[in-house]
Amino acid sequence: MATAQETHKLPGDLNDVPGWFWPLDQVLFSWFLERQERQGTRGDLLELGAYLGKSAILLGHHLRDGETLTVCDLFETEPPDAANRAEAAKSYSTLTRDAFERNYLSFHDTLPRIVQAVSSTITDEVGAGTCRFAHIDASHLYEHVRGDIGAARELLLPEGIVVLDDFRSEHTPGVAVAAWEAVLNRGLSPVCLSSQKLYGTWGDPEPVREELLAALRERDDIAVTVEEAAGHRLIRARAKSKRMRPPSLPSSRHPAPAPAPP
């Protein structure tokens, strides 16, 4: 895993922001959020673990009047336990709140609500049943991820969507255990799996599965397979190439100048 780098160059577009938020997941985030908007579902957005803001910037692009995006991250605050300190020192030693804010404000007029604290405090900061979408990408340690999943269940609307990052990476077995435990024992229904993230709901998964499957099958840049496992219907999505049709993305205030004509 790469070490986080604090950025000083202002990003000219979303892909200039460092982070592991791949084009396929940008498409999927946008699809779920736009579906909620089409259906008139209102609620706040939540991200646990911000890194340098790449996914938060896209979430902020989908905020509507009266909605709030809350971002919870330790940033440079000392982690509360030895295992978390070791993880932060290895992968996020140069991550700062200033870098996050600088990137975010390159695309948006105002910052999201920032909770600079451990993710276990989020249920004290956000009201139960107020969120329509939650992205969990904080600690990779089983105990913390399990707690973050429980918090998401409490904070989401009944049909809300939760996204679990790194659920299948070889360096994050604790996330895998917590994710599949939630599916098998805690009522979470998976809707879609990408190479990096599990998208799920504690509501009825079938309507959103069917709509997503139809939408993905219309694209020639995404490969889709469906299989059954432990009573769950799993949609697996994979990018066919690195060049995908992007979703609607926020525009930077600092776009790169157009190349000079030949």
Image: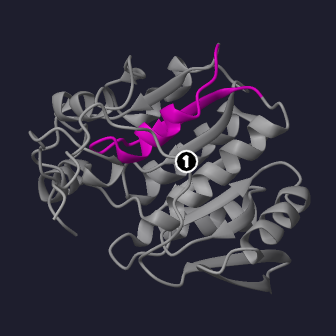
Is residue 158 at least partly visible in the picture?
no
Coordinates of residue 73 in the picture (x, y in percent): 33, 35
The residue that disc 1 covers is 248
Question: Does residue 129 appear left or right of residue 179 in this picture?
Answer: right
The part of the chain drawn in magenta is 42-65
Q: Quadrant of the N terminus?
A: bottom left
Q: Which residue is at a point 70% across and 24% down the rendered structure image? A: 130
Q: Is residue 62 magenta?
A: yes
Q: Which residue is at a point 73% across and 68% down the rendered structure image? A: 184
Q: Is residue 239 magenta?
A: no
Q: Which residue is at a point 65% across and 13% down the rendered structure image? A: 66
Looking at the image, what colour scheme do you see? Answer: one colour
Q: How many numbered callouts?
A: 1
Question: Does residue 78 appear left or right of residue 141 in this picture?
Answer: left
Question: Does residue 205 appear left or right of residue 88 in this picture?
Answer: right
Describe the element under mark 1 as helix, strand or loop: loop
Q: Residues within 10 Å of mark 1 (few under 14, many from 20)?
A: few
**Kind of residue sitting beneath label 1:** Ser
Coordinates of residue 153 in the picture (x, y in percent): 68, 41
What residue occupies the far top of the structure in this picture? 66
Residue situated in front as seen by the camera: 147 or 111:
111
Q: Is residue 226 above or below residue 68?
A: below
Residue situated in front as seen by the camera: 241 or 213:
241
Q: Quadrant of the C terminus?
A: bottom left
Coordinates of residue 80 in the picture (x, y in percent): 25, 37
